[in-house]
Image (spheres, rainbow, N blue to C red):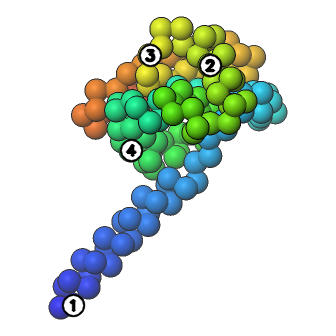
Amino acid sequence: MKWIVYVFSIAIALFQLNTGARNTIEWETNYEQAFKMAKKENKNVLVYFTGSDWCGPCKMLKKDLFETEAFNTLSKDYVLLYIDIPRNKDLLTPAEYKQNKELLQKWNKRGVFPLLLAVSAKQKVLDEYSGYSMNGEVGYHLQFLEKNK
């Protein structure tokens, strides 16, 4: 019986550790605010284009990359900008939807999802990484983040 309690306690602790990493990351959804923060903090902006309600690779990337301690650590070097292009327009305010469609035309003309962009505070695209193979391998994504901070 003690063994079951021990295993259960470890499982809860691991779940809380994983949840903690998830809860400390804050994505900005307002374009102007993100670049204002980037200038103030002298950081690049990590722009993430996703289709939160329809893009399978985007959903897997969220779990495999964005909810990890490694991303939590590397993300501190960026201002994070989340650009969602959902099929269900009710997931965004009309202002967010308009802004996100404009940013899609500006920075993601090919309509590739998921797409990560490293953008300077002066709004110059420094680098991009698109797609996700959904096999749990996020090494290239982490290298992208390390290289562009």
Give the quarter of the figure containing the N terminus.
bottom left
Q: Are marks 3 and 4 in contact (CB under 8 Å)?
A: no
Residue in view at x 46 percent, y 60 percent: 19
**Cα–Cα gap, marks 3 and 1:** 51 Å
Q: Tell how many labels.
A: 4
**Cα–Cα gap, marks 2 and 4:** 25 Å
Q: Name the amino acid, label 1.
A: Lys
Q: Name the amino acid, label 3.
A: Val
**Cα–Cα gap, marks 3 and 4:** 19 Å
Using the image as rendered, state which of residue 83 and residue 39 is in the foreground: 83
Q: Which residue is mark 4?
A: 63
**Cα–Cα gap, marks 1 and 2:** 56 Å
**Cα–Cα gap, marks 1 and 4:** 32 Å
The tag earlier along the polypeptide, 2 or 4, is: 4
Q: Name the amino acid, label 4.
A: Lys
Instruction: Please give the label number shown on residue 112.
Output: 3
Q: Which residue is mark 2?
A: 101
Q: Which residue is mark 1?
A: 2
148 sits left or right of 56 in the view: right
Crowdedness near tag 2: few (<14), some (14–19) or many (≥20) residues, C-alpha within 10 Å? some
The tag earlier along the polypeptide, 3 or 2, is: 2
